[in-house]
Image: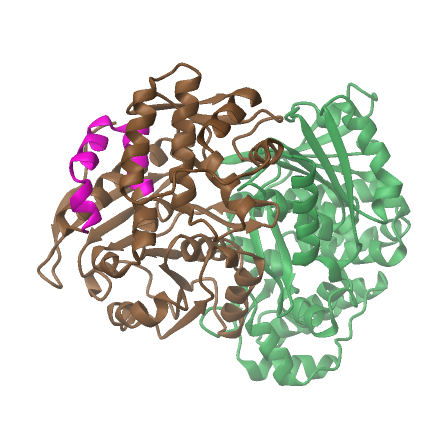
Chain colours: A brown, B green
Amino acid sequence: MASSDTSRVPDAGSGQIRQTLPVKAGAGAYDILIGAGLLDAPASWAGLPESAHGVIVTNEVVGPLLASRLMRGLAGRHARLSVLELPDGEAHKDWATLNRIFDHLIQQGCDRRTVLYALGGGVVGDITGFAAGCYMRGVPFVQVPTTLLAQVDSSVGGKTAINHALGKNMIGLFNQPLRVVCDLDVLHTLPEREFAAGLAEVVKYGPIADAAFLEWIEAHAHALRQRDPEAIAHAVRRSCEIKAQVVGADERENGLREILNFGHTFGHAIETATGFGTWLHGEAVACGMGLASALSARIGLVGVDVERRLAALLASFGLPMRPPQLPPQTWLELMRRDKKAHAGLIRFVVLEEVGRAAVRPVADELVIDVIRAAA
Amino acid sequence: MASSDTSRVPDAGSGQIRQTLPVKAGAGAYDILIGAGLLDAPASWAGLPESAHGVIVTNEVVGPLLASRLMRGLAGRHARLSVLELPDGEAHKDWATLNRIFDHLIQQGCDRRTVLYALGGGVVGDITGFAAGCYMRGVPFVQVPTTLLAQVDSSVGGKTAINHALGKNMIGLFNQPLRVVCDLDVLHTLPEREFAAGLAEVVKYGPIADAAFLEWIEAHAHALRQRDPEAIAHAVRRSCEIKAQVVGADERENGLREILNFGHTFGHAIETATGFGTWLHGEAVACGMGLASALSARIGLVGVDVERRLAALLASFGLPMRPPQLPPQTWLELMRRDKKAHAGLIRFVVLEEVGRAAVRPVADELVIDVIRAAA
C-alpha cells in the first residue's frame, strides 16, 4: 500500500493536534478526524450542515457517558438537537431497533435536512447509517465511533446494515457519512474485552495489506494492550489509512475491497451460529483470521509459520482462537450465505504472503479439514 | 418541456413495433420499453444480466394472471427462476412484506448478482425496488409495471419505499432499475377503478409540464375511458417522456422533480388518514390535484377556470374530488410530515399557469380555507 497522506492540522479550538485523513468514495469524499478531545470541540463539527434538526443516535451504555460531551461540541448548530438511546448489542441490530429510529425521527418532525450523529460502536454506526440512507430516501449522517473496532473499521467505508435472522448484515446499504470523528479519549474507558476485539481488526490490516504494520503491531503489542496513547493513535491512523485506500479504490466491493473481509466469512458464520452478540464481532473475526490463515497454508499459499505467527499475536491480546463446535454442514451452509459467494461457491480471503491477500473459491473438504484441525 | 426523443425499434421476436425511451439518472441510464406483447417476448429482456438467480416478485392477484407469461419471456436467462407472490394492496407496503422478500431471497440462496423482476403495480414496484436496494447492500432489478399508474408514474424515476404507520413512503431509497418494461396488453384487464386511478397520474403531467398534452387528454377522454389502444399508447408514452425528462434533470428531488408531486401533499394525507388502501393512490392524488389547483387559484396564481377545468376532467374519469372529513389540525399535522417540508413549513406544488408548476410554502389558514370549500 502507498504510505500515509494524512496531514497535521492544529485544532483552533483546543490547541491540540488532530489528524485529518481524506477518504474518496465514489463521486464524493469526506474526512476522518482522529485525535484526543474531539467530541466537545466545536472545530470537529465545523463545516457540517447546520439544519433545523440534529439527532444523536446512541445506545443506553454510551449515551449516559458521552452524549453530553457531543452535545457541547454541537452547541448552537441545530435549533433542535435530540438524543435517542437504543438498546445495546449486536442482538439489537435488527428491524425493530431500526424502526425505533424512524419512529423518533417522524415524531420529532425531522425533515430531509436532518443530520444524524451515530455515537457508539459498530452496531450504532451500522444501524444509524442504514436509517439515514432510508429515512425520507436519505438524510445526511456523521459517524462518531466510540469503540476501537468502530474507529478502525466499521465507521469508515460506508457499509451499513442490519442483521436478518438468517444472516449477518444481509440487509443494508452503501451509504457514506459526511465525516468520521474518532475521539481517541473515549477508548480509555472501553471494557477490556471490547478493546481486545477492536485490536483484532487492527491486526487484520497487517497480513492483508502492510507487512511492516504487522511488525509494528508485534513490536508494540504490550503498549497497545496497555492503551498507550501514542501507540493507539498510530494504530487507529494507520488502520484508517489502509481502509480508506482500499475503499477509495473500490467503494462497492466489486474486487479489492473484499480483502477487508479477511477472517469474516468464518467469523460471520460463528456470529450467526452462536447467536448475535455471544461472540463479539472482533472475537469472531480473530478466530476467523486464524482459520483463514490455516486455509491459506493448507492450499499452499503461505507456510504454517504465518498461521502460527498470527495466531500467537491474536492470542496475546486475549482473543479466542478456538472455533465453536458446529457440524461441518452447518459451517458450510452458513458460509454459503456469505455476500462474497457466487452461485453457491464459497470464496475466502486468503493470504498470498504477509501483506497481500486475494479472494479464492476453496473446496468444501479443505475448509472442513481446517476447521476440524483448529477445534 | 422538450418534445419526444423516443425511437421506434422493430421487435425482432414478434415483428411488433415497440418504443424505447431512454432515461438518464445520475451517472447511469436505462431504457423504458413500451409496447404490446412485451412480457413474453425474449427481445424485451435481451441485454440484461443472465445470472444464476432470477426472482419474479409479484402479488397474489397479478401473479396467477401474468407470471407465466413473464417466465416464458425470461426462459433460459437464469438457472433458477422463482416466483414470490406477496399480499395485494397498499396496506401491505410495509416492513413485514419487505421481510418476506428477504426471507425468500436468503432461503433460495440468492447472491449479489440475483436479478429481481417487479411484476405488478406501484406497491410491488416500490417494495421490490427497495428490497433490491438493500438485499446484500444492493442487487439489480427490473420494473415490469402492470397497472396504468405504475407504467406512467411509479415505475419510472427510481423512487422506492415502504410506508410507516406514521406516514406514507417515509422509508425508502432512490434506486434506479436496469430497465422498465411496459406491456400495454396488460392494461385491458385492469379493474375500472384502478384504471381510472392511473388516469389521474396521466392527467397530472398536463398541468405541471405540458398544456398541449392536457388538451390532448381532454380531446381523447372518451377514447381513454374506452381503453382505445392507440390512445393508451400515446398517454403512456408521453407521460413517461415527461417523467423521464424531469427525473433526468433532478434524480434526487432537489428541485424540479418536486413538481411531480402535484396533488400528492394533500393526497398522502388522505391516504394516511383513511388507512392505506382505502383510497387508491391515484384517487387520493386526483382529489389532491383538485385541492392544489384551488390553492393555486386562492393565492392568485391562476384563475378559478383552471381549477374547474381540471376538476371536470378528473371527475369525468370517475375520480373522487371530495376530500374526506378530517379536522383541520389533522390535515396540517399529516401534511407537515411531507418530505418536501422544511423546518415545519408545508410546501405545496402549485400551478403558475397550465403547463408550469412550482413549489411554494403556503400559510396554514389558506390551506384550511381551500379544504373547507371543497368538503
Query: Would you say A59 lies left or right of B169 here?
Result: left
In this view, the residue in front, B374 or A1, is A1
Q: In the rendered structure, does residue A206 fall within the stretch colored magenta?
A: yes
Taking the spot 53% from the left edge, 66% from the top edge, the residue there is: A100
Q: Position of residue B53 (x, y in %)?
A: 68, 30
Q: How many marks?
A: 0
| Residue A232 position in % (x across, y down) | 19, 48
Secondary structure predominantly adopted by residues drawn in magenta = helix
Could you say which is closer to the camera, residue B24 or residue A280?
A: A280
**Viewport quadrant of the N terminus of chain A:** top left
Question: Residue at point 29% right, 71% down?
Answer: A71
x%, y% of residue B87?
A: 79, 54
Query: What residue do we see at 69% from left, 66% from top?
Result: B289
Q: Which residues are magenta?
A: A200-226
Question: Can you name the residue that lies furthest to the left here?
Answer: A15
Residue B147 colored magenta? no
Residue B48 in sight from this viewpoint: yes
Residue A279 left/right relative to A44? right
The residue lying at 75 percent from left, 31 percent from top is B81
* Residue B354 in view of the camera: no
**Is A139 left, or right, of B313 in this rendering?**
left
The picture places residue A170, in percent across and down from the top left corner, at: 56, 44
**Location of residue A182 with respect to B374 vertically, above or below:** above
Check the image and report above or below for A81 versus A242: below
Examine the rendered structure and indicate whether residue B15 appears above or below residue B238. above
Above or below B200: residue A67: below
